[in-house]
Image: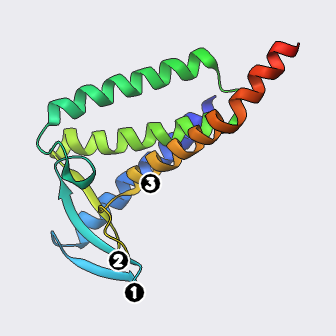
């Protein structure tokens, strides 16, 4: 169980480090190509969620994050971490939620920096990547693995 918390902390540190690096080395709205036509670093301050929705609703984000993180930690301890994919998923989800939460509480906005140049997609950060990976892993578990476990436990 502790390994998943360590993983979440390391991902959270990576997220916060990447945001500090952008803020210290880029002017607001400055762009630098990393992979031409594919990926750029583009420093923005996002006061909402993806695509800027719910802009300026810090109290809303505070409540949602506290409830979701609390429920996630409670469920993780209640259900246990016997399945690696679930533990890894929780680590990614926890680090992503806390990474953006720290920004909102400390700065009043979220620092975003990755821009996909080949598609119209929101600018994002490491925490957003962690949230996405966590959701994908949990979806894989629920769709393809959980049902098999229920069947096996009924056959015992």
Which one is nearer the viewer's eye here, 85 or 119? Answer: 119
- In depth, the one of 143 and 112 nearer the eye is 143
Q: Quadrant of the N terminus?
A: top right
The residue labelled by disc 3 is: 129
- In terms of image quadrants, where is residue 57? top left
Q: Residues within 10 Å of mark 2 (few under 14, many from 20)?
A: some
Q: Which residue is mark 2?
A: 117
Which residue is denoted by mark 1 in the rendering? Answer: 36
- Relative side of 76 to 49, left or right: right
Quadrant where the C terminus sits is top right
Measured Cα–Cα span from mark 1 to mark 3: 21 Å
Q: Please state which of the two labelled residues, at mark 2 or mark 1, is closer to the viewer.
A: 2
Q: Residue at x 55, y 46 (%)?
A: 136
Rendered residue at 77%/29% (across/down) = 148
Can residue 3 be spotted in the picture? no
* Residue 86 disc label: none
Q: Are marks 2 and 3 in contact (CB under 8 Å)?
A: no
């Amino acid at each position: 169980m502790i390994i998943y918390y360590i993983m979440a902390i390391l991902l959270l540190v990576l997220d916060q480090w990447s945001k500090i690096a952008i803020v210290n080395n880029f002017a607001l709205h400055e762009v630098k190509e990393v992979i031409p036509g594919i990926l750029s670093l583009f420093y923005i301050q996002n006061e909402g969620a993806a695509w800027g929705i719910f802009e300026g609703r810090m109290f809303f984000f505070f409540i949602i994050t506290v409830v979701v993180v609390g429920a996630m930690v409670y469920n993780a301890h209640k259900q246990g971490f016997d399945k690696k994919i679930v533990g890894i998923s929780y680590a990614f989800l926890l680090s992503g939620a806390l990474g953006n939460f720290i920004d909102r509480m400390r700065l009043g906005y979220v620092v975003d920096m990755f821009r996909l140049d080949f598609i119209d997609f929101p600018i994002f950060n490491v925490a957003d990547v962690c949230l996405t990976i966590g959701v994908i892993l949990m979806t894989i578990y629920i769709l393809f693995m959980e049902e098999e476990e229920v069947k096996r436990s009924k056959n015992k």
